[in-house]
């Protein structure tokens, strides 16, 4: 899903510096990780843009870790923000 920038849901940002736009992650606490094709100084987990398997495994691990120990809460929905 793309968009939902104003909703406070857990998200992964797709950040490509070559596009010339500023990233959202420094000012948006709902962004949990970056998918990028360039090195960053972010403290967030950075996943390689050209490795969709790594992105899927990260999302599955995140969902699994948030599911256990929190009964009666649904797993969070994730949205990707393309920049």
Image (cartoon, rainbow, N blue to C red):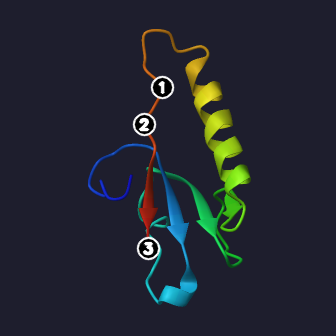
Residue 16, given in percent of the width and then of the height, sits at: 55, 78
Label 2 neighbour load within 10 Å: few <14, some 14-19, many 20+: few
Q: In the displayed structure, would residue 20 be above or below residue 40?
A: below
Task: Out of 26 and 2, give the one closest to the viewer.
Answer: 2
Q: Which residue is mark 3?
A: 83
Q: Which residue is mark 2?
A: 77
- CB within 8 Å, label 3 to label 2: no
Q: Earlier in the sequence, mark 3 or mark 2?
A: 2
Residue 3 location, quadrant: bottom left
Q: Is residue 70 left or right of residue 68?
A: left
Q: Earlier in the sequence, mark 1 or mark 3?
A: 1
- Label disc, if present, on residue 75 of the rendered structure: 1
**Residue displayed at 59% across by 13% down:** 69
* Residue extending farthest top: 71
- Secondary structure under badge 1? loop
Q: In the displayed structure, would residue 49 be above or below residue 64?
A: below
Task: Out of 50 and 37, give the one closest to the viewer.
Answer: 50
Q: In the displayed structure, would residue 59 be above or below residue 30?
A: above
**Residue displayed at 64% across by 26% down:** 64
Label 3 neighbour load within 10 Å: few <14, some 14-19, many 20+: some
Q: Looking at the rendering, in which quadrant would you find the C terminus?
A: bottom left
| Disc 1/disc 3 C-alpha distance (Å) | 25 Å
Task: Out of 12 and 70, give the one closest to the viewer.
Answer: 12
């Amino acid at each position: 899903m793309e968009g939902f920038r104003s909703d406070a849901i857990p998200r992964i940002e797709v950040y490509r510096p070559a596009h010339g736009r500023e990233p959202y992650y420094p000012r948006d606490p709902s962004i949990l990780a970056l998918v990028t094709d360039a090195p960053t100084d972010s403290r967030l987990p950075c996943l390689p843009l050209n490795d969709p398997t790594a992105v899927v495994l990260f999302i599955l691990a995140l969902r699994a870790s948030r599911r256990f120990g929190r009964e009666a809460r649904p797993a969070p929905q994730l949205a990707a923000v393309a920049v």
